[in-house]
Image: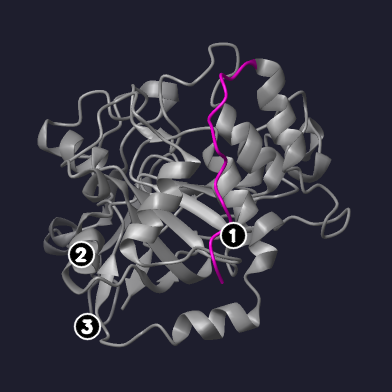
């Protein structure tokens, strides 16, 4: 498959042109009125078989951030880092808390965390515009009991396929893009061409800006919720035109911040998540993968990135694994 041509120029965005972009790539009803998978429908059995054939060396690379108290969350949007606690530990055993058991003793633990505080996918039920999420489902579908439609568990068997890394930082020759720097459709296409990789139907695209690695070295700062490099609105042309199944990056919100227009918060979420039905992945740690891809010049791989199937959740953590 050959890359389709990128848009020739990036417009000066306003609210009306963003809504027109969203309408242009809207897929509501494309897979029926009850669809909850969106562009993940592009990952069919043949696509998974093709992806499996990319495994050549058996190198396994995790793309997840550690789930611990040293993460980037500092309270923005009510999110905190994971709180890990022990239910039964060695002290309990030493004090005789398990003497009623015959022979063996055990330790046990738990965790409390916002489901989007580290490496995660946004479910379609995460974002609404004018009372509608993907496929036109309304606000009543998400209650205090969770999401009755488009919960993250719907995606749990669908985010396995061909992964493609677009290493924008390396393409630009920098360690990391600066906050506020955007990545356009033209640059995504140029990066793919320079890397010798095509992007097509059913692919899961990973975009590296280097922002996560830079923020981690500096103690995170305002990484979670602050200004960041990221995808421009025009990236929708690249992603939707090639029928990409999902897209993820190494920043907190995937799209560029500050946003490209002031009167729509996270406008690319509106275009991709709400209208085009493309799941968005955030806070992927792409550093080890980037080094591996640069080392052998191969930017495609088998990717298993299924979220944990919390029923009714609007986002889901996971440990995405790339295999080359």
> In the figure, 290 relative to 278: above or below?
below
Look at the image and say whether residue 11 sits in the magenta stretch. yes
Q: Earlier in the sequence, mark 3 or mark 2?
A: 3
- SS for callout 3: loop
State which region is magenta.
Answer: 1-14
Image location of residue 222, percent across then percent down: 26, 23
Of callouts 1 and 2, the N-terminal one: 1
On screen, residue 38 versus residue 322, left or right, reads: right
Q: Residue at x 78, y 39 (%)?
A: 141
| Residue at the disc numbered 2 | 294
For the stretch drawn in magenta, the main secondary structure is loop
Q: Which residue in the structure is indicated by mark 3?
A: 103
Q: Quadrant of residue 192?
A: bottom left
Which one is closest to the eye, mark 1 or mark 2? 2
Residue 50's spot in the image, x, y percent? 52, 83
Where 154 sits versus 25, above or below? Answer: below
As drawn, 250 above or below 22: below
Instruction: Identify the residue at horizontal 46%, vertical 84% (top origin).
Output: 52
Classify residue 136 as left or right of residue 22. Answer: right
Q: Looking at the picture, tell me which residue is in the foreground, 26 or 70.
A: 26
Mark 2: give few (<14), some (14-19) or many (20+) Cα within 10 Å.
some
The quadrant of the picture occupied by the C terminus is: bottom left
Q: Is residue 296 left or right of residue 182?
A: left
The residue that appears at 63% across and 42% down in the rendered structure is 273
Is residue 115 in view?
no
């Amino acid at each position: 498959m050959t890359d389709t041509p990128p848009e020739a120029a990036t417009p000066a965005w306003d609210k009306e042109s963003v809504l027109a972009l969203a309408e242009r790539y809207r897929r509501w009803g494309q897979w029926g009125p009850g669809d909850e998978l969106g562009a993940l429908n592009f990952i069919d059995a043949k696509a998974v078989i093709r992806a499996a054939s990319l495994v050549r060396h058996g190198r396994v690379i995790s793309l997840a951030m550690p789930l611990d108290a040293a993460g980037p969350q500092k309270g923005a949007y009510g999110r905190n880092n994971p709180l890990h606690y022990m239910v039964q530990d060695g002290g309990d055993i030493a004090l005789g808390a398990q003497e009623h058991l015959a022979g063996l003793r055990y330790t046990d633990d738990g965790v409390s965390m916002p489901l989007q505080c580290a490496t995660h996918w946004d479910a379609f039920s995460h974002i609404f515009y004018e009372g509608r999420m993907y496929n036109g489902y309304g606000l009543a579908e998400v209650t205090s009991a969770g999401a009755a439609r488009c919960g993250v568990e719907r995606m749990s068997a669908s985010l396995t396929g061909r992964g493609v890394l677009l290493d924008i930082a390396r393409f630009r020759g920098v360690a990391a893009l600066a906050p506020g720097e955007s990545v356009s459709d033209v640059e995504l296409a140029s990066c793919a061409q320079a890397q010798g990789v095509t992007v097509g139907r059913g692919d899961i695209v990973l975009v590296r800006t280097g922002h996560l690695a830079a923020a981690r070295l500096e103690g995170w700062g305002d990484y979670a919720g602050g200004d960041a490099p990221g995808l421009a609105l025009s990236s929708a042309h690249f992603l939707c035109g090639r029928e990409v199944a999902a897209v993820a990056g190494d920043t907190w919100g995937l799209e560029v911040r500050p946003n490209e227009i002031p009167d729509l918060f996270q406008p690319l979420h509106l275009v991709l998540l709400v209208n085009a039905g493309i799941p968005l992945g955030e806070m992927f740690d792409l550093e080890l993968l980037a080094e591996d891809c640069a080392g052998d010049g191969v930017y495609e791989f088998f990717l298993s990135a299924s979220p944990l199937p919390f029923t009714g959740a609007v986002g889901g953590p996971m440990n995405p694994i790339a295999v080359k």
